[in-house]
Amino acid sequence: MDSTNLLHIGTCSWKYESWRGIVYPEGSPINYLHEYGKRFSTVEVDQWFWSLFAGNKAVLPKRSVIAEYASSIPDHFLFGIKVPNSITLTHHYSTDRHQPLRPNPHFLSISLMHQFLKAIEPLGRHIGPLIFQFEYLNKTKMSGLTQFLSLFGEFADHLPGGYTYCLETRNRNYLQPRYFDFLATHDLYHVFLHGYYMPPLFDVYEQFRDSIDKLTVIRLLGSGRQEIEKQTGEEWSRIVAPKDEDISRLASLLSELGARGIETFLYVNNHFEGSAPRTITRIEQALRTTRRVPGNPQNTPP
């Protein structure tokens, strides 16, 4: 397979009015996802992640929404889907540090996971990576990596086949050889998170390059959400915080992953530079430049 066919680039979510004139046509009401699919081959679905509510209520995707999404996309399109936080949260969210933590009874519930997979089943071949996103786990929520791997390992052993499962940690100290060995043992794939106080993805890749095999996910989230929201006024149509060096290094990294035959899903957030579609254009331009470097016939980094 051509290395370019191994790269899927899209955005984190898609329904933004401020993308009119960039991704969407101006004027009349539109089917955002249908128009989005004309430009991109994948998208990260964030909305089903927010699923845990007061009273330990866990909400699953609606059939009508699943049917709408399935009918709105082209044949080649893939959804990167964040698994509901009713499965990945150890405790309910709380803004009051003085209140005791409320355990989430659905944490790593294989029964709830099966229900979720059943709900999204109509998406069929359009289901791409399923991402388990974990928040930063302090010592009151998880004693450490050993306990985390033990709990998730037991859960992973009961996951049904036929899906691509990917794991995102926000504990930088978890990124060590036994974590990546665990992923390989359980047929899981690493999610590179660029932002949110995690080490730069380039450093993590360099350290664990040999542990990245077959498939990976990269999420460009940036840092300082409040600052960039203030800069943009949450109008996501322009680059306000250009990261030229990151873009250049990312293009080289993506080219290397392609040359190694590793399927890569790249999801870009508006908060990375101010406008995810415009960032993707910059990445695509950088990729073309990287691939034109003389003496670089296999799309490897210059």
Image: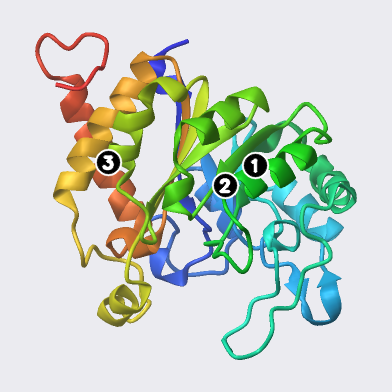
**Tag 2–tag 1 contact (CB < 8 Å):** yes
**Tag 1–tag 3 contact (CB < 8 Å):** no
Picture quarter containing residue 270?
bottom left
Tell me how many marks there are.
Answer: 3
Whether residue 181 can be seen here: yes
Residue 279 appears at what percent x and percent y? Answer: 29, 51
Q: Which residue is mark 2?
A: 145
Q: How is the protein colored in the picture?
A: rainbow
Q: Of the residues under marks 1 and 3, which one precedes in the sequence?
A: 1
Mark 1 belongs to which amino acid? Leu
- Distance from the alpha carbon under mark 1 to that under mark 3: 35 Å
Picture quarter containing residue 189?
top right
Residue 94 shown left or right of residue 212 in the figure? right
Question: Which label belongs to residue 223?
Answer: none
Residue 31 shown left or right of residue 106 in the figure? left
Q: In this rendering, is residue 2 above or below 58?
A: above
| Residue name at image x 56 percent, y 61 percent | 137
283, 210: nearer the viewer: 210
- Distance from the alpha carbon under mark 2 to that under mark 1: 6 Å
| Residue name at image x 85 percent, y 81 percent | 55
Q: Secondary structure at mark 2?
A: helix
Q: Which residue is mark 3?
A: 283
Q: Which residue is mark 1?
A: 149
| Residue name at image x 69 percent, y 79 percent | 101
- Distance from the alpha carbon under mark 2 to that under mark 3: 34 Å
Residue 272 appears at what percent x and percent y? Answer: 32, 59
Residue 214 appears at what percent x and percent y? Answer: 52, 20
| Residue name at image x 45 percent, y 42 percent | 175
Mark 2 belongs to which amino acid? Leu
Residue 95 shown left or right of residue 127 in the figure? left
Whether residue 71 can be seen here: no
Mark 3 belongs to which amino acid? Ile
